[in-house]
Amino acid sequence: MPLQAKLILLSLLPLLLVTALTSWLSIHQSKTLGDQEIQIFEDGLIRSKETALKDHVDLAFDAISHIYNDDSLPEEVAKQRVREVISKLRYGKDRDGYFFVYDQSGVNLVHPVMPELIGQNLLHLQDENGDHLIEALLSQAQSGGGFHRYLWRKPSTGENVPKLSYAAWLSKWDWMVGTGLYIEDITYEVAKLKSEVNKNIETTFFSVIVIVVVTVGVIVVITLAVNLHEHRLADRSLKELAHKTVMFQEDEKKYLARELHDGINQLLVSSKCHLGLLGEALSDNDIPVRETVTNHLEQSKHSLSTAINEVRRISHNLRPSALDDIGLEAALATLLQDFKQHSAIEVEAIVKTQGGKLQSEIATTLYRVTQESLTNIEKHAKATAVMVSLQQLGRSLQLIIRDNGVGFSPNAQKQSSGIGLRNMRERVEFIGGEIEISSDIGLGTEITVLLHLEELA
């Protein structure tokens, strides 16, 4: 796994684990609190309904108390009058609240909304859930009054909906008097509250997800930015090191060239001179001996001349003295002249500068680019003519090297593993220049270098 991916992973894993744990705890806590809130809300609505039902039954008892407690009335007359009063009692916004009466055996005595039930024994009546609702209400009433929930058909809709009833006991006659309220509105309100709570939990969850995604994105961007910055710093350091290495090599070449030219070359020249003097001194000696010695002297002088030329060539290739002594233009002129002599390729040189000695790095870079380009042309281009142009354009210096050789494919050049073109590009880019290499098969190659001069030395 790449180091960059490891850094991002190490940064994100703790965050994701902590966020996941925190999110789970928060959502679990929110759900628990939401369920408690819903239960409290539902219990509050139920209690309000229960209070209202008990109040209604108490009012009904107050309405019949004067009859129920009148001992002067015959019992059957009193019962009939109580049934009539209870059947007429209504309450609620639409006067849809009513009262029902059952005896202890479960026979219906009063039901103003469903009169067909009057006289029927409904003790074993069950709702669709199997609840014996009349039996349960009788039990609640006989125990001092109580509540019971069940399903009952709502007259306005004809649907079976939840209903809450309260029943109280008339002990003298063993009657149960009760009333009920449909509580499907409570179910609706509870469902609505549940939906809102779940929506809030979902909103919180998605908010956490968004925050996590944004945080992860920020961390990834920052990590990539830091990694890119460090990579650029490392790349810059490597380029600086490479440039210092190249310049160190140039200094070494310069030193070695000087040593060859001023040291070994001078010794060779001196040896050649002494051999010449020796030849002159032997001119008056015995002819056979003179001829033999002269022959050896000539061979020695030829070898020394060859060695001198070779030392000069090596010295020049290492570091042309003209580049340090009289500047870039003279060094380029010598380089082009030598190239023309040993390659037999026509060379056209155009040099238009403002004079003055360039900085060492600039001069060395342009010279090495030209030298490398000419080497590539000689080896690969099969060219018959080369044009080298060095011109100063304001505060910029432009070098163009163009040949009429076979050229190459730009794609092949990009995939090439050769170090010549790469070295040229790195040299130019390090000192802040621009280099462009363009070529077409059969149309030759052109290398353009543009340097922005800080100053002319």
Image: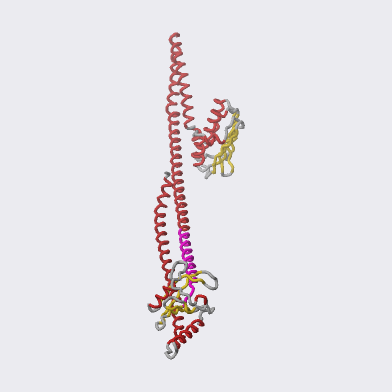
- Left/right of residue 230 with respect to residue 345 in the rendered view: left
- Is residue 348 in view? no
Q: Residue at x 56, y 43 (%)?
A: 396
Name the residue at the left extreme: 143
Question: Number of labelled discs?
Answer: 0
Is residue 53 placed above or below 290 in the rendered structure?
below
What is the span of residues highlighted in magenta in the rendered image? Answer: 179-208
Q: Residue at point 47% right, 18% down?
A: 302
Residue 410, relative to residue 159: is it above or below? above
Q: Position of residue 208 (x, y in %)?
A: 45, 59
Measuring from the top left, give residue 455's x and y in whole percent. 52, 44
Q: Main secondary structure of the magenta part?
A: helix
Find residue 2 and report its image quarter.
top left
Q: Is residue 266 above or below residue 44?
A: above
Q: Nearer the viewer, residue 205 or 261?
A: 205
- Left or right: residue 356 versus residue 142 is right
